[in-house]
Image (cartoon, grey):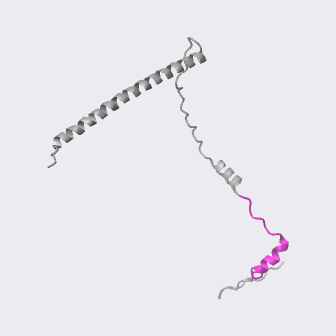
Amino acid sequence: PAPMVDELEEASDKADALTLQAQALARENALELGRLRARIARAAEARGKALANIVGEGAELPPLSSKIEPVTPRPIPPITVGQLVYDAIVNTPPPEPVPPASALPGLIASFGGPPTMAVPPPGVAALPPLTR
């Protein structure tokens, strides 16, 4: 018969393995953190030297960020009637061209001929024709 492995012993072995992995990861992270801190220190030193070369020794360093004044919007003036009329004149397209007078007979014929005198309703006398 195969020996029975105790569940508690198996869990303990797994916990030990995870502990060793965590310790190795912590050591690796500590080394990486040390390298990162060294890089940041070198970058800060290089930045300080570069700013000293630009500004000059003993001069005041420029600010890291400048304060920007907020822009206040200008108030919109009220619209006057004169402005409305001006906008209407400027923005209205020109009227359609009127056909010349020579085309008038053809235009009237296209609508069925000249208008006829309407017959007055019963009981209303017709007006006499105009004479000069």
Quadrant for residue 8, please give it: top left
Between 11 and 46, which is closer to the camera in this rendering?
Answer: 11
**Left or right: 28 with respect to 12?**
right
- On the image, the x and y values in percent for residue 128 come to 76, 83
Residue at point 47%, 21% (across, down) = 41
**Left or right: 121 with respect to 48?**
right
* 15 relative to 81, above or below: above
- On the image, the x and y values in percent for residue 60 come to 55, 15
Between 16 and 80, which is closer to the camera in this rendering?
Answer: 16
**Left or right: 73 with respect to 18?**
right
Image quadrant containing the C terminus: bottom right
Residue at point 57%, 39% (across, down) = 75
Between 81 and 31, which is closer to the camera in this rendering?
Answer: 31
Residue at point 65%, 86% (across, down) = 121
* 128 relative to 95, above or below: below
Quadrant for residue 131, please give it: bottom right
Quadrant for residue 101, please give it: bottom right
- Please identify the residue farthest to the top as the structure is shown: 58
Q: Which segment did they paint magenta?
A: 93-115
- On the image, the x and y values in percent for residue 49 come to 55, 17
Residue 69 magenta-drawn?
no
- On the image, the x and y values in percent for residue 13 come to 22, 38
Residue 103 magenta-drawn?
yes
